[in-house]
Amino acid sequence: MNRFLSVLVSLTATIALAAEEPNPRTDLYGDPLPPGAVMRYGTIRLRHCGADVTFSKDGKQLISCGTDGTVRFWDSATGKLLRQQRLAWMPRSPYERLARMALSPEGVIAAAWNGQMVYVYDVNTGAERGRVRVSVALNYSLEPLLKFSPDGKLLVLQVLEADKPRSTQIWDIAAFQKRRTLGGSNRELDAVSFTRDGKRLLGRDGGKLFLWDVHSGEEIDTGKQLCVPRARGLAFTPDGKTAAVGSLEDGGRTRFLDAANLKERGGTNGSAAIKDICDDRLVFSSDGRFLAGSSKSDRGRIFIWDRTGKKETQRLPGWNVFAFSPKGQTLVYGLHEFGKQLCLWDAALGCPILERPGQDQAVAALATSSDGRFVVSDAEDGVYLWDAARGKSLRKWQGRSNRHSCLLSPDGKRLIRFAGVDTIQILDLASGKEMRRFNLDAAFDEREPCQVLGLSADGKRLTVVVILGETSAKLYVWDLVAGKELRRVPYKLQERITSLSRGRRELRGFAHAALSPDAEVVSVWREGRVGLEEVASGRLLAMLPAGVGWPLVFSPDGQLVAAAILQPKPDPAKGEDRKGVALIEAATGEELFRLEIDAFDRLAFTPDGRGLVVADGKYLRVWDTNSGERLHRIRWPDGLRDSFWREVRTCSLIALPGGRAVTGLSEGEIVVWDLSPETWPSRPLSRDLDRKQLDALWIDLAGEARTARSAVHRLTAAPAQSLAMLDRRVQPAAHIEAKRIDKLLVDLDNDDFVVRESATRTLAELSDRIEPMLRRALQDRPSLEMRRRLESILAYVNRPSAERLRTLRAIVVLEGIGTAEARRILEKLSDGVDARETRAAKAALVRLQHRSPAETGRTSP
């Protein structure tokens, strides 16, 4: 009894607490956000991946049935989601999927095909009515024939049985039994269309057209059999007197035929026709005035033909034509074949209905300005500019590019993006106009998704790594002010594993590249490992631990690298698995710690570098970059799961100031999540350091990477004492006297081995500052010993000396503190000679200039 009372009290408290919770957050259009989300860029209205769509009988609702196994009911006037019903689809494995959906004309019954079986469902309840095996094995390459009669009582299927030709069958959905096979077993129909009364059926076998009586199943004699070469889509007018047949002949002309005898009555003229009209994607409006058809050519176009005026009225970017409204001239169509966006078009007025911003394809790239005011998203359907604070669309640039990479200039005034496969555009955000473009005069492989753009801290120099093919790539550097190409060198790709699948060569891995935020350092592949190379000189700065692979990202200050640790699978042909994330110091290549995460999609540092955001199929998590502890976790809501993988697939990820992260998902949705640092657990560090502690931390700054990282963390948390100490102790890079270098060069040929070794080490530590002197010495015909040592120095991994490491790490502390006094010390360091630490101080000052007011002067807890 006591136990029952305690459970009752607990339940009552839970209900009361839920009642006190504020209203759930909504996006700009009033639709609810997922738990943990604070914003959505664009809208989810009328979006359903891989869906077939139709209108309800009264036209008040749109009904979509997608390959994710759900049916969604939309208000056709507002596009608002009214309800959602999941079909009783139970995949046998995570890789099994629904490949095609078909809805009955009034949206009551749905048919789904998975490569082997056709399942029939009641749309309102999701219950399965029955299933038909249409193939002996899973085969997604063979598109099935799925066509409902106008009353939704019959379904036409194409069945492929073992050792038999394909047969076209008509099934009674109510009794769920086969009614008949059309034309026996010698008709392999690839498209059919019913008359509005459902009494006759037009079928296409190759280029030959046939008419059947649906009730008897007998073929109707039309006299001379009509043959339309390369015939495509089929459709009847509402009165059943005319049939439209698309053809690839005559420039894609659509013919109008007498439905009684299939004699030609005219058609669209050649100038209005569209080539490559999709099968079964011709539809007439309810009054028969308009004909709409779709084409796969030129990435998809939809034409609308006015039969009254005998002219084409519109040509729209789109892929599939679905249906006209039952009592109007509203057309619903898909923007892409496998896209998410559904569009409404008024055929009479020639204008869109319920136009809303949002990306239709997987968001392959996200970028943000330094102050976090703007976010750019890039996908196949274009590039959007968003107001990061309000989630409002500010501008869209049309144009498809396979090379998904974009970035914003540090001042937030310019957008740099790939336009096509061989052009880079510089766009003005305010006007949207193109300011400059660079052409990459090379033959690129459009299948390769890997490329990267980088901009120097001052925004004057653009660095690009592009993949030319399976084994080659190039690195380009341009001067944006003068428009000149500064450098072009081959880029070494990581070896990739290939295999043969069904007789076709497949890549199991792919090339990747990463640039530091100031575009000074690029990841490279050297002798089976990833290294970090200086862009300007090509010097190798560090080699990363074995097993490091993609994804690989730099921290905002470029001092840390987060990367996947890859392990080969037991079968070499199947590539590699991601087995954890390593956090690495960029200056030394030393691993700080490792996060034990089996699988993940994307990595991103928070703007202050304190957190590492990791997105996997189940969670969005934040890890402490100082300790490796998990700080925060959000579990993905079920509604965001990818229809194929059945888990959330994050295609792009960035972190914004103020503890927010933006995710671009595989089905086009862009969601902003609350990762507020206020919710992170923290261990308060002492802000009062005595002289002894400061001396110890100063020594630690020059030590191994993990110890130095801890020292950076503690010094940043005590700004008053740290700044006083660093002001006294860190000095700008000084000029190196030529006499000293000449003496060291002579010592390379000394008779004493110890002297030669000492000179080699010293010159290697200084090599980035004296490279011209070293190369001149190499050209002066040195002795064999001296030549060997000079070549080894120039090829040496240029690890900084302990003193220079200390200065580089001190710059991290100063940027982390970010106050006026910290900037003054950075300015002092930036006055040194051209050296790695001088450039690091200058870059830190530029980043602090663009830091948002909320971030300025904030130190780590």
Image: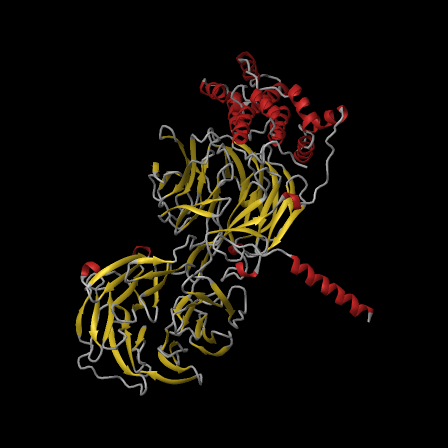
**Picture mark count:** 0
Rendering quarter of residue 762 = top right
Query: Is 737 placed left or right of 170 in the picture?
Result: right
Does residue 112 appear in the picture of this structure? yes
Residue under the point 54% across and 37% down = 531
Query: Nearest the camera: 323 or 165?
Result: 323
Q: Where 580 sits versus 710, above or below?
A: below
Report whether 685 appears left or right of 240: right
Q: Quadrant of the image for the N terminus?
A: bottom right
Question: Quick check: 351 above or below 845?
Answer: below
Query: Is 478 situated left or right of 497 in this image?
Result: left
- Left or right of 32? Residue 379 is left
Near-viewer residue (375 or 279) = 375
Residue 753 versus residue 658: which sits nearer the camera? Answer: 658
Residue 567 appears in view: no
Colouring mode (rainbow / by chain / secondary structure / one colour) = secondary structure
Please state the horizontal and vertical placement of residue 507, each as a whole percent of the image.
Answer: 46, 53
The image quadrant that residue 798 belongs to is: top right
| Residue 765 percent across, percent down from the top left | 58, 24
Q: Residue at x 53, y 35 (%)?
A: 532
The outermost residue toward the bottom is 216
Q: Position of residue 79 (x, y in %)?
A: 43, 61
| Quadrant in the rendering for residue 65 | bottom left
Query: Where is the C terminus found, in terms of image quarters?
Result: top right
Q: Residue furthest top?
A: 739
Q: Where is residue 845 shown, x and y percent of the image? A: 54, 27
